[in-house]
Image (cartoon, grey):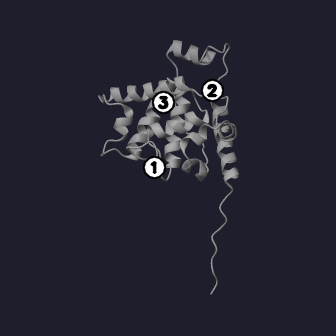
Amino acid sequence: MSVATAPAAPSLELSADLLVAEIEHYLAAQTRTTAHPLVTKTTAELIAEALGTAPAATAPAPAFTEPPRLLRLLPDWVLSVPLVRQLHGGYGRTVFPAEHLELTALVIELYGWTQRQHRSRSGRRCILGAQAVLYRLGYGDDATVAAAAGHLQAVLAARGIRQPYHQWNDAPDRSRDQVLALVREAAKEARR
């Protein structure tokens, strides 16, 4: 009788490197080239908008690799440690609200979704918990998170829902798919 052995788990360092590479690839694809740093749209986008021929703002879902399990299970404050941010985060990167929301959806997909807590013992996240992961790793600042929250609230308001998005997330009849749809719709609105 032979004893089957489990395959060796991938290195956490390798997984973290893949995660960072995927985030950098996504952010590089989202880079905008404008004439002035204060301009947020390219000349072509401004002309298309003025002529009313602007295409619908749709961004492909960014590719993302499963984050290292250790980063999901450690306390959230660990993500703010400068070395962790430098190795695994968006240290020194500008992230726009739409990108922050798209990455929020990806964190929920990859970490898992939870309710009535920012994170579960296994590392699953609610909307706020997913935003906290990105914020602590340096993907966006206070203004980015506030703008993203405004877009989430605007989408809910358009649906006639007045409660804060974190309370909406916690409703007993809420599903993961509904949460992801809200976050992605808010990202789409943020791109307009």
Dot 1 or dot 3, earlier in sequence? 1
Q: Nearer the viewer, mark 3 or mark 2?
A: 2
Q: Which residue is mark 2?
A: 94
Amino acid bearing label 1: Ser
Q: Which mark is residue 181?
A: none
Residue 176 seen: yes
Look at discs 2 and 1 and give the one toward the viewer: 1
Q: CA distance from mark 1 to mark 3?
A: 28 Å
Residue 154 falls in image quadrant? top left
Decide: marks 3, 2 in contact (CB < 8 A)?
no
Q: Residue at x 38, y 42 (%)?
A: 178
Q: Earlier in the sequence, mark 2 or mark 1?
A: 2
Up the image or down, 162 lies above or below 11; here it is above
**Hey, which quadrant is residue 25 in on the image?**
top right
Q: Residue furthest bottom?
A: 1
What's the residue type where badge 2 is placed?
Thr
Helix, strand or loop at mark 2: loop
Residue displayed at 53% across by 48% down: 110
Q: Quick one: 91 or 174, which is closer to the camera?
A: 91
Q: Characterize the local packing of mark 1: few (<14), some (14-19) or many (20 or more) Cα atoms within 10 angstroms.
A: some
Q: Quadrant of the N terminus?
A: bottom right
The residue singled out by tag 1 in the image is: 120
Q: Position of residue 109 (x, y in %)?
A: 50, 46
Please give the residue where the numbered disc 3 appears in the rendered image: 188
At 55% across and 48% down in the image, what residue appears? 72
Bin the neighbour count of mark 2 within 10 Å (Cα to Cα): few under 14, some 14-19, many 20 and up. Answer: some
Residue 55 appears in the rendering? no
The spot of residue 81 in percent (x, y) is: 64, 38
